[in-house]
């Protein structure tokens, strides 16, 4: 089998016309060039060079192989240049996993921005829960995961994962218009005993955070309705069938018939980008983080404002973009 190492030496011999010229170009000795030529001829099964006075010249087979060697050398050089360029270029596949509550609010804008600024980047996105997305990140089935971390239930991260907080936002209590606490802002969670709740499925971060928070306020929650989609939860709130706690970014624009109230104790949620520790500085992941941070800041600023009800055009309180430095 013809190997690239010997073919590279032969390409240099063909280009420079002598063993000495090839040796100088490759920074090896003349005998090393001659040895590689002899081995290449055995691999090819034919003579490739022949004596020509005090030098050598290519045989007919040598000319044929020299053409292929030059083409391969050019392809290898192109590959090396492309790989070097990737050290600084945002290009190639980028596999992203995300919690569902961030998809609709953020990813149309984020994917559009990435396509416009980095046309050689090829992102793919699918939704899931943190419990499934983080193992996929560690196994290299995903390159990045957008997850949520709630005030009363911080995300639990496996070893080797780095996180960067993109934005932190208040979580609001959603109740039907006319509810007994609709005019109280903030609404005491300890006074919500006996309410029927809508939440995300059991085992998810929002569900577990809600259960822990209510129990900490001496309320045993009756969670009858489990939907991953916050918009569906709010449809039940609007119908007067349940109350819910929702992050503002997940409910833009706010529906009519639902009041959004601050809570006491206050609840917050952070959107966090998780990557493998050794990959965090790669250009595609840096570009993704910047696009997500910008989109998250705008989405949170447009979130429902507690107080007078739907249609009020005020920024939600307590919003703070996170510092860009990674943590964890």
Image (cartoon, grey):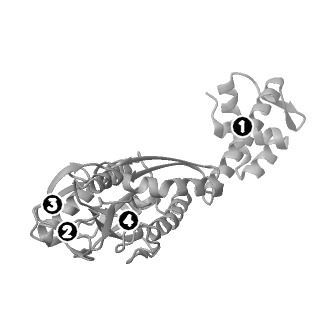
Q: What residue is shown with label 1?
A: 72
Residue 273 makes an appearance in the image: no
Q: Is residue 307 above or below residue 3?
A: below
Q: Nearer the viewer, mark 3 or mark 4?
A: 3
Tell me if label 3 and label 4 are in contact, CB under 8 Å.
Answer: no
Of the image marks 1 and 3, the number of the one nearer the N terminus:
1
At which x and y percent is residue 313? Answer: 47, 72
Tell me if label 2 and label 4 are in contact, CB under 8 Å.
Answer: no
Residue at 19%, 68% (x, y): give it.
180
Looking at the rendered image, the quarter that the N terminus falls into is top right
**Within-10-Å neighbours for mark 2: few <14, some 14–19, many 20+:** few
Label 2 and label 1: CA atoms lie apart by 77 Å
Residue 6 makes an appearance in the image: yes
Tell me if label 2 and label 1 are in contact, CB under 8 Å.
Answer: no
Q: Nearer the viewer, mark 1 or mark 3?
A: 3
Label 3 and label 4: CA atoms lie apart by 21 Å
Q: What residue is shown with label 4?
A: 248
Tell me if label 4 and label 1 are in contact, CB under 8 Å.
Answer: no
In the structure shown, which secondary structural element does the residue marked by tag 1 occupy? helix
Label 4 and label 1: CA atoms lie apart by 56 Å
Of the image marks 3 and 4, the number of the one nearer the N terminus:
3
Q: What residue is shown with label 3?
A: 195
At which x and y percent is residue 106? Answer: 48, 58
């Amino acid at each position: 089998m013809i190997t690239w190492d010997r073919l590279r030496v032969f390409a240099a011999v063909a280009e420079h016309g002598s063993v000495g010229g090839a040796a100088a170009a490759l920074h090896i000795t003349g005998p090393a060039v001659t040895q590689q030529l002899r081995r290449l001829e055995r691999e090819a099964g034919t003579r490739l060079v022949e004596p020509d006075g005090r030098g050598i010249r290519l045989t007919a087979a040598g000319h044929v192989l020299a053409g292929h060697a030059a083409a391969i050398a050019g392809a290898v050089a192109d590959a090396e240049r492309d790989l070097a360029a990737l050290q600084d270029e945002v290009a190639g596949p980028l596999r992203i996993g995300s919690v569902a509550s961030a998809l609709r609010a953020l990813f149309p804008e984020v994917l559009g921005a990435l396509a416009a600024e980095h046309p050689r980047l090829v992102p793919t996105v699918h939704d899931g829960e943190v419990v499934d997305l983080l193992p996929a990140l560690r196994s290299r089935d995903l390159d990045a995961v957008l997850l949520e971390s709630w005030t009363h239930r911080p995300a639990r991260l496996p070893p080797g994962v780095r996180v960067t907080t993109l934005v932190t936002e208040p979580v609001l209590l959603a109740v039907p218009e006319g509810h007994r606490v609709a005019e109280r802002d903030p609404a005491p969670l300890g006074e919500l005993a006996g309410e029927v709740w809508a939440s995300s499925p059991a085992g998810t971060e929002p569900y577990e955070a809600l259960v822990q928070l209510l129990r900490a306020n001496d309320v045993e929650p009756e969670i009858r309705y489990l939907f991953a989609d916050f918009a569906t939860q709010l449809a039940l709130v609007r119908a007067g069938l349940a109350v819910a706690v929702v992050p503002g970014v997940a409910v833009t624009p706010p529906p009519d018939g639902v009041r959004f109230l601050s809570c006491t104790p206050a609840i917050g949620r952070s959107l966090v980008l998780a990557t493998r520790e050794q990959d965090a500085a790669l250009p595609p992941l840096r570009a993704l983080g910047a696009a997500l941070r910008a989109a998250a800041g705008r989405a949170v600023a447009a979130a429902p404002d507690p107080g007078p009800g739907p249609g009020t055009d005020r920024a939600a309180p307590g919003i703070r973009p996170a510092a860009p430095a990674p943590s964890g």
